[in-house]
Image: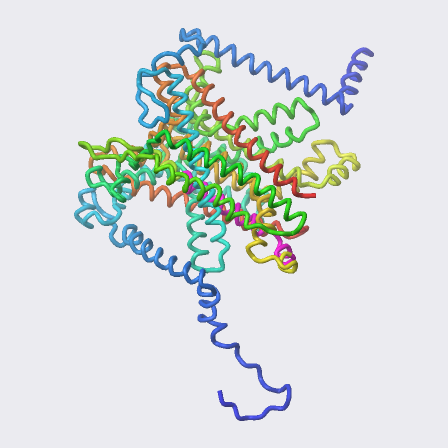
Amino acid sequence: MESVEQKRNIISTLWNDKEKRAVIIQIFSIAGLFALVWFMIGNAISNLDALGKGFSFDFLFQPASYDINQHLISYTSRDTHLRATIIGIMNTAMIAVAGIILATVVGFTLGVLRLSKNFLINRIVYIYIEYIRNVPVLLHILLVHGVVVHSLPNPKAAMTFNDSFFLTKRGFFMPSPDFESAMTVVWIALAIGIAFTFWFRRYAKRVQDETGKIFPVFLISFGAVVIFPVLVYFLAGSPITWEIPVLKGFNFKGGMVVRPEFLALWLALSLYTAAFIAEIVRAGIIAVSHGQTEAAYALGLRPGRTTQLIVIPQALRVIVPPLTSQYLNLTKNSSLAIAIGYMDIVATIGGISLNQTGREMECMIIVLALYLIFSLSISSVMNWYNKRIKLVER
Amino acid sequence: MSDSREYAVGTHPDLPPPLSTSGAIGWIRGNLLSSPTNIILTVLSIYFLYKVVPPSLNWLFFDATFNGDSRQDCREASNGAGACWAFVKHRFHLFVYGFYPVEQRWRVDISFILLPLALWPVLFDKVPYRKHLLKFSIAFPFIAGWLLIGGFGLTPVSTDYFGGFMLTLVIGVTGIVFSLPIGVALALGRQSNMPVLRVICVTFIEFIRGVPLITLLFVASTMLNYFLPPGTQFNLLLRVLIMVTLFSAAYIAEVVRGGLQAIPKGQYEAADSMGLKYWQSMQKIILPQALKISIPGIVNTFIGLYKDTTLVIIIGLLDPLGIGRASLADTKWTGLTTEIYVFVAIFFFLSCFSMARYSLYLENKLHTGHKR
């Protein structure tokens, strides 16, 4: 009788002591988690055994035997699944980088226009943003793809600019550059220009801090990075020859080509994300209190300098964290490429390779891991940038 | 203005403001023509509107065909200049019900009618008998589930027949209903003092947020069966529902965590000093305030979830987009992709825009007290 009482006492002391209870709960949750994982792995092993599949990544080194129409490095259907995966990774990275750039540019423009005092432009941008934000991104991708494919002309009736750029149903054909050996000089000039700019900016800042003298930093940097290499390029005798695409049979040959799938996905994703970025930018600019601008004017700064030195740095602090998640969203949304047949990670290793080899488990693990790596690297870069602009605060 | 009368000092009646600064002219001057940049923007916008609005309206309404039995009829009626809404009209039932058996469709209709009734007390405060209606709201997902799936006296209907807007609503509503509590639990776990729980929750949240929904849906459709006891047949729709719920729960957890972090420390300490236990202090002090702050974010997550329901077509479920694309296989209607996309886009725009408006309304309503 008494032992039961004692036992109950032990349990209730354990349970009523906050720290001990925490330990108990944690032990149980670890145990529960391990049991679940054990159960799932056990099931997976027996299920795979029943199908006679096993678990190995050997299939990565077997020939993929399917074609990928857009590849940055050479690829034929006799290459391995591993190489197909790498092509997929490169395609995803390409759409992510291109999309992030266009989305940022369009988003910032729209965000500023949304704050315009001009009633018409303000309303147009508002309607555009609301339309984009309230319609699923998959629908945008399909719609833009439909428009791109249906409204563009056949190669024979291609829209052309200067007889070297051709816009057709089959893609956007451009001349591809062919570098001659003299081009090295131009690259060196560009490197010198960039290095000079870095040095000059620090020098200008130091001089300004010490003496208050202001250099036209932007103009000089522009000259060093753009005008100087261009001059060298012409002095070296224009060492780039352009290979111009030519219509042969039913399609263009030669030059570079941007596939319609890429074009559609790129436009749809960037325009979609741009609408979200526009709202973020607008909120960021509004968040800088008007007192800051007035204080800058009171100190005698001109409007341009005020924007550059007072408004933008403070707005960026508000803008960057949500901007990061928009960049991540864009990268993750690029996986919808599969709906229009753009060969990204999901379509290569998670799609055709998976169906051909029947190795669902391995393929999906690779896909998930790749996306995690993408997401984590983007967010670490943006966190680094965020910390850097945060340091300004005292 | 030759007013010859003389006034004593200070008795002159107020003059109206100059014409150029008030009324329509003043408005146009101030808003459209105030500076050279502004004038350029105005001219560009008018040109843009002129280029875009009339053709779109023509395509959508004036040149569109609303009646007909095939695409040929549309072509003959409008020379192919306008949209062929006859197609949408012809297939409207398919868009709404998917392949749900015709004689059982009344069950879907009843669910559609009950849905606003269940939402009403949740969305608004001043509802008569709100307390009783809220009980109904909680019961609604189960009632609707019973009505749609059947059993217990109703003819069972396989979920393979679910489709169209009904499928969108099923996934959306289930995801919303179940992801909120799971999300709150995850957020509490992430903020907990127990390191193990924290690590588990953080790993789960970051994993889900790090991968696209589409890969999770692929996992659901290809890989999930491996992890279940051999021979288990697991309904595809249920798998999708679980994945969608977990996905949005992770995002809600982050939104709620923001709310939890915004509560001043004094509130936690005050609750502790009153002798409240963990769950009591959460339930009575912390969560009401934290959830109130995070409502706009939560609604945004719900809008995202609702839009993401379209992704299910990639693993073969037939939501409105899927239905539309499937009906294009009919040779009578081939090639009408734009009409389908625009129609589905309008549906999503209406539902998501009203959700966004509701979130704005809530923000304004909740901004009563301590606005800092």
Q: What residue do we see at 45% from left, 17% from top?
A: B225
Horizontal and vertical percent position of residue A132? 42, 45
What colour scheme does the image use? rainbow
Q: Residue at x 62, y 32 (%)?
A: B187
Horizontal and vertical percent for residue A256?
Answer: 31, 33
How many marks are shown on the rendered structure?
0
Q: In the rendered structure, does residue B137 fall within the stretch colored magenta?
A: no
The answer to whether residue B355 is seen in the rendering is no
Is A88 or A299 nearer to us in this picture? A299
Q: Position of residue A215 (x, y in %)?
A: 57, 50
Which residue occupies the extreme bottom position in the image? Answer: B5
Q: A383 or A165, which lies in front?
A: A165
Give above or below for B334 relative to B363. Answer: above
Q: Which residues are magenta?
A: A269-295
> Is A45 in front, or is B55?
B55
Q: Position of residue A26 (x, y in %)?
A: 68, 20
Q: Is residue A273 magenta?
A: yes
Could you tell me what secondary structure mostly forms the magenta stretch? helix
- B171 w.r.t. B71: above or below: above
A113 displayed left or right of A166: right
Which residue is outermost to the right? A2
Residue A6 visible somewhere in the drawing: yes
Residue sitting nearer the eye, B159 or A281:
A281
Q: Specify the quadrant that holds the N terminus of chain A.
A: top right
Q: Quadrant of the C terminus of chain A?
A: top right
A298 left or right, relative to B272: left
Could you tell whether B54 is left or right of B211 in the image? left
**Res. A228 image quadrant:** top left
Residue depicted at 44% across the width and 45% down the height: A106
